[in-house]
Image (tube, grey):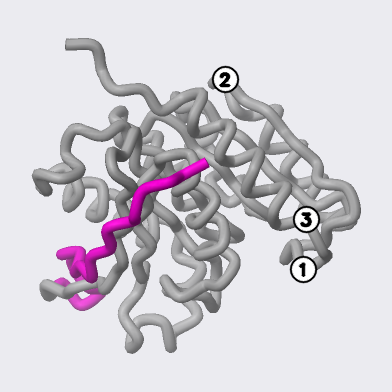
């Protein structure tokens, strides 16, 4: 269990807006001392860096000495257009902007990277990982990996799909996506959980499984 304090920083991720202008995406970087890896969170539709579920998962990752970055994938104005909320290539580009941002920080540039996606954010995380070889692991919680389409076949990072046992439609979509993935992969079904993992203990179980996956696959590169 984690015994040291967590250092937290309010950050702004530079990105390009849908109008082509430079924008800043607010986020919160949290680092245990010392961090053994860094996980970037990609929230689902209608959510933000303040997602209580992702914040809960992040807290459990900290107990395994894994740092986290929760950030907004869209500006407030962009999020009012539902087209942007479901634009997987746009969301993936924002995740890539965040990977470039943390690669430029002294505190995080040396850390192996993981991506944690929920709902549509999971598809965006997979698309981003297919384009960024520095991503060492991906976890999807209640995600829609099927929305990554053909990019699933070029994902190289070990990928864990977490789905609620009572989330029947999404479970079937994840099974199909699992068959498309050609990387190291695993599907874990959390018994009794529905799509949002609201049932007692189910989010804790999903977070535990995610932490185990990241601990297994986030390794500092050999000098």
Q: Count of labels shown?
A: 3
Vertical arrangement, residue 125 with respect to residue 45, above or below:
above
Residue 204 or residue 137, whichever sits in front: 204
Q: Tell me which label, 2 or 3, sits earlier in the chain.
A: 2
Name the residue located 47 percent from the left edge and 30 percent from the top edge: 155
For marks 1 and 2, give the one nearer the viewer: 1
Label 2 – label 3 distance at C-alpha: 24 Å
Left/right placement of residue 156 relative to residue 67 reads: right
Rendering coords of residue 110 (x, y %):
18, 32
Q: Which residue is identified by label 2?
A: 184
Question: Crowdedness of circle 2 by 10 Å Cα count: few (<14), some, many (20+)?
Answer: few
Left/right placement of residue 179 relative to residue 3 reads: right
- SS class of the residue under badge 1? loop
Are the two marked residues, 1 and 2, in contact with CB atoms closer than 8 angstroms? Answer: no
Are the two marked residues, 3 and 1, in contact with CB atoms closer than 8 angstroms? Answer: yes
* Number of the label disc, if any, that sits on residue 198: 1
Question: Which residues are the magenta region?
Answer: 1-20
- SS class of the residue under badge 2? loop
Name the residue located 43 percent from the left edge and 44 percent from the top edge: 115
Q: Tell me which label, 1 or 2, sits earlier in the chain.
A: 2
* Number of the label disc, if any, that sits on residue 202: 3
Question: Crowdedness of circle 3 by 10 Å Cα count: few (<14), some, many (20+)?
Answer: some
Are the two marked residues, 2 and 3, in contact with CB atoms closer than 8 angstroms? Answer: no
Rendering coords of residue 40 (x, y %):
38, 51
Location of the C terminus (image quadrant) = top left
Name the residue located 43 percent from the left edge and 46 percent from the top edge: 3
For residue 195, what is the image quadrant? bottom right
For marks 2 and 3, give the one nearer the viewer: 3
Question: Crowdedness of circle 1 by 10 Å Cα count: few (<14), some, many (20+)?
Answer: few
Rendering coords of residue 136 (x, y %):
39, 29
For residue 119, what is the image quadrant? bottom right
Instruction: Look at the image and say whether residue 50 sits in the magenta stretch.
Output: no
């Amino acid at each position: 269990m984690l015994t040291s304090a967590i250092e937290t920083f309010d950050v702004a991720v530079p990105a390009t807006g849908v109008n082509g202008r430079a924008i800043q995406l607010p986020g919160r970087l949290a680092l245990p001392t010392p961090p053994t890896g860094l996980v970037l969170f990609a929230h689902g539709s209608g959510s933000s860096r303040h997602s209580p579920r992702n914040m809960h998962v992040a807290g459990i990752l900290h107990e395994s000495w894994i740092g986290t970055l929760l950030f907004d994938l869209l500006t407030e104005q962009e999020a009012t257009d539902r087209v942007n909320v479901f634009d997987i290539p746009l969301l993936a580009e924002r995740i890539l902007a965040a990977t470039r941002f943390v690669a430029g920080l002294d505190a995080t540039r040396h850390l192996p990277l993981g991506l944690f996606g929920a709902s549509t954010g999971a598809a965006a995380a997979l698309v981003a990982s297919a384009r960024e070889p520095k991503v060492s692991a991906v976890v999807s919680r209640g995600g829609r990996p099927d929305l990554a389409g053909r990019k699933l076949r070029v994902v190289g990072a070990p990928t864990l799909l977490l789905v609620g046992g009572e989330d029947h439609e999404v479970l079937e979509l994840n099974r199909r996506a699992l068959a498309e993935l050609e990387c190291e992969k695993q599907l874990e079904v959390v018994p009794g959980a529905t799509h949002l993992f609201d049932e007692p203990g189910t989010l804790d179980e999903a977070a535990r499984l995610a932490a185990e996956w990241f601990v297994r696959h986030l390794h500092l590169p050999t000098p």
